[in-house]
Image: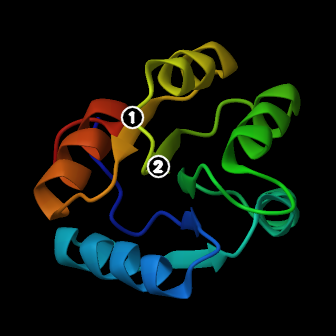
Amino acid sequence: MAVDFNMPILIVDDYKTMLRIVRNLLKQLGFDNVDEATDGSMALEKLRAKSYGLVISDWNMEPMTGYELLKEVRADGQLKNTPFIMVTAESKTDNVVAAKKAGVNNYIVKPFNAQTLKQKISAVLGDF
C-alpha cells in the first residue's frame, strides 16, 4: 500500500516547540497536510470533526494525556482504526506495555530524528 503524502496528520503536544519540530520532520519526509492540537481534548475535537490518516501524540499533557486520548480514540467506533503513534520522553517498560494494551500502533522515545520518524511511520502505514 502506497503512503499518501497528502493525508491529514494530527500532531498533539503541549509544547509549541515540539509541535514545530515534529511538523518540520514530517515536512522533510514529504508530509505537508499537518494539523496541531495542544492537548488530548483538543485533539479529540479535531479527530471527531475531520478524518486523519495518522495521529502522532505526546504522552505527557494536561488536562488530557496522550494515553487517555489513545484510549478515547480506540473506544470510539468512528476513530478506532486511526493509526496512532505515541511520543514520549519516558522509555519505561510499563508505559510501553500500557500503550500497547491500549492499542497504540507504534512508540517513539524523545529525542528522535527524521529517520526514526520515517521508520516508525513506515512500520504503521507501509514503506515510503
Q: In the depicted view, which residue is nearer to us: 43 or 47? A: 43
Q: Residue at x 45, y 42 (%)?
A: 90
Residue 58, image x, y percentages: 56, 56
| SS of the residue under disc 2 | strand
Q: What whole-number distance in Å separates the C-alpha atoms at marks 2 and 1? A: 7 Å
Decide: is 96 above or below 13. above
Q: Is residue 6 above or below residue 66?
A: below
> Which amino acid type is marked by label 2?
Thr
Q: Which one is nearer the viewer's eye here, 14 or 114?
A: 14
In the picture, the disc for residue 111 is none
Specify few, some or many for label 2: CA neighbours under 10 Å numbering under 14, 14-19, or 20 or more. some
For image coordinates 25% across by 53% down, the residue present is: 117
User: Does residue 79 show up?
Assistant: no
Q: Position of residue 79 (x, y in %)?
A: 77, 39
Q: Please name the residue that numbered disc 2 is placed on.
A: 88
Q: Are marks 2 and 1 in contact (CB under 8 Å)?
A: yes
- The residue beneath circle 1 is 91
